[in-house]
Amino acid sequence: MDKPLRIARVSVFGIFGVNGFILALWVVHIPSILDRTGVSKASLGLLILLVAAGAIVGMQLAGPLADRFGSRPLVAGSGAIVSASVIGPGLADNAVELGIALVVLGFGNGALDVSMNTQAVYVERAYGRPIMAAFHALFSCGGVAGALLGAATLAADWDIRVSLLLGAVIGIVLAALFSARLLPHVQPEHKPAATGAPKQHPSSRVWALGAIAFCVLLCEGVANDWSALQVKEDLGASDATAALAFGAFSTLMTVGRFGADRVAAAIGPVAVVRYGTFVAALGMGMVVTSGWIGLTLAGWALFGLGLAGAVPQIFTAAGNLSKDGAGVNMSRVFGMGYLAFLAGPSLIGWLTKVIPLTTAMLVPFVAVLIAGVFAGVVRPHDAEGPLSAVWDGKRAVAK
């Protein structure tokens, strides 16, 4: 393995970490920002929609640009935008200014999501073995670092504008350093299709992958927003105990992602998604039926572990549907998944008006089962196609 490729892999790790770091800074400062701007907690859902709107625009613009000019300059530009834009919410004095700041933050994050995952596909393709899940694990590690920095500055009673400025400077510097060592763009050679060869229809595969991403990311969104409240309301747990539900989910998801690449290399991407989502369904089944805190926390932990490897396999499959359309394909899959990540918690909130919260958890239970049943969509589409570079001759590409 040559040195530039190893450096590129480390750099992609770094970019994923920067992304998680910046988003965590925004999240931990939400209460302070709402107080500063006078925006009510009831309006937070609308603000999140503004982040989503900006992100989807950023994703759809970044995809074609990454395919045309390469993901490296897109990572550099979007990394700088998302890092700098985290200052915006801290400078806002009212709801309108905050809304504008969040659209910009969402735009930068959406563009970075697509461009860094496109670069990750290129690096994984060059490596010749699955390494995507570990990149996503570094996003979680970056989130922990951002949360710790935010908590430390809040505890020290820093002005939020100062702490967000510090985070922005760190993000801009690291994004510039890491993006400089990414793989350059290589224009693919367009070869005429062999006579009589069956036509590939990547667009249908993109929508199928997007549907699976929708199911999986809906579950992640529900766990992020409702896991702690489910334990508190259903079992009467204290706030501190209830918080362990999300802690169990996120910890096992991070640990699972560090090991998911080896599992994918051994048994194939379809098995990772199928068996993983079935494990997640088992965990959610425990959550729905358990009346004991220990068993419920174990259920949330299994839910995170089971989902750990699914999204990386989906994005790898989307990025390898065609050698010259990775960015566009991933932007579409990302867009569908991102909508679900936000829509899932909203759906649960609506359902709680008519059924108990724990009963509403049947929605993610069904979603992971659907993802498991249709996991075959992540299978490489042929032995000579773009994904063949990720699996050597000793592995069965159709696993």
Image: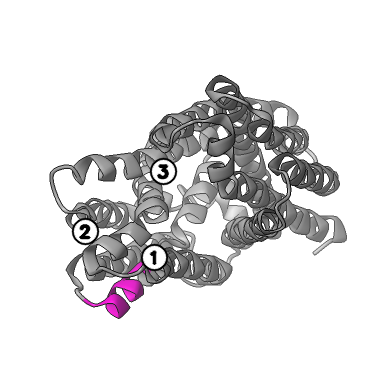
Q: Position of residue 111 (x, y in %)?
A: 63, 33
User: Looking at the picture, does residue 139 appear above or below residue 250?
Assistant: above
**Which residue: 30% across, 65% down?**
231
- Residue 319 is one of the magenta-drawn residues: no
Callout 2: helix, strand or loop? helix
Q: Which region of the structure is painted magenta? A: 292-300
Callout 1: helix, strand or loop? helix
As shown in the figure, which amino acid type bears the numbered disc 1? Asp
Q: Position of residue 368 (x, y in %)?
A: 30, 56
Between circles 1 and 2, the one closer to the viewer is 1
First of labels 3, 2 by sequence position: 3
Looking at the image, residue 276 sits to the left or right of residue 31; the answer is: left
As shown in the figure, which amino acid type bears the numbered disc 2? Thr
Q: Position of residue 120 (x, y in %)?
A: 66, 49
Q: Which residue is mark 1?
A: 239
* Dot label at residue 341: 3
**Which residue: 59% across, 61% down?**
137
Q: Which residue is mark 2?
A: 358
